[in-house]
């Protein structure tokens, strides 16, 4: 089998300078060695359950109702001022 171009370059450096380039390599790989697994059914259901419900743990037990939302209505005194200004 023939030598690769990188192998020939390494041999050339070893012959001419006496330096073994393979010893300069790191012992740790350059890529992630974390084992990736498929999510379990429980993890998938938990993600789908909380996907659109980014609420604090204290609010999770409170059902969503109209009382929980903030409506930006104008204050009542501005409505009264507008009514008196229009002559009603």
Image: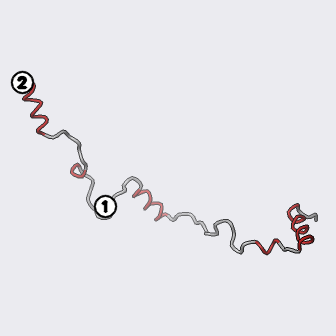
Q: Nearer the viewer, residue 77 or 59?
A: 77
Residue at horizontal 6%, vertical 24%? 87
Horizontally, residue 76 falls left or right of residue 16, namely left
Secondary-structure class at tag 2: loop
Q: Nearer the viewer, residue 63 or 86?
A: 86
> Where is residue 36 shown, x and y percent of the image?
59, 66
Circle 2 is placed at which residue position? 87
Residue at horizontal 25%, vertical 49%? 69
Horizontally, residue 12 falls left or right of residue 60, namely right
Which mark sits nearer the N-terminus, 2 or 1? Answer: 1
> Where is residue 52 shown, x and y percent of the image?
39, 52
> Where is residue 11 shown, x and y percent of the image?
90, 69
Residue at the outermost top position: 87
9 lies above or below 26: above
Quadrant into which the N terminus falls: bottom right
Secondary-structure class at tag 1: loop
Circle 1 is placed at which residue position? 60
Quadrant into which the C terminus falls: top left
Is disc 1 surrounded by few (<14), some (14 to 19) or many (20+) residues within 10 Å? few
Protein image colouring: secondary structure
Of badges 2 and 1, the one in the foreground is 2
Horizontally, residue 2 falls left or right of residue 75, namely right
């Amino acid at each position: 089998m023939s030598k690769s171009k990188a192998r020939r370059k390494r041999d050339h450096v070893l012959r001419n300078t006496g330096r073994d380039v393979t010893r300069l390599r790191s012992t740790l790989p350059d890529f992630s060695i974390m084992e990736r697994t498929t999510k379990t059914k429980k993890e998938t259901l938990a993600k789908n359950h909380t996907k659109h419900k980014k609420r604090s743990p204290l609010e999770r037990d409170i059902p969503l109702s109209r009382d929980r939302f903030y409506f930006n209505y104008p204050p009542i005194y501005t409505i009264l001022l507008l009514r008196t200004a229009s002559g009603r």
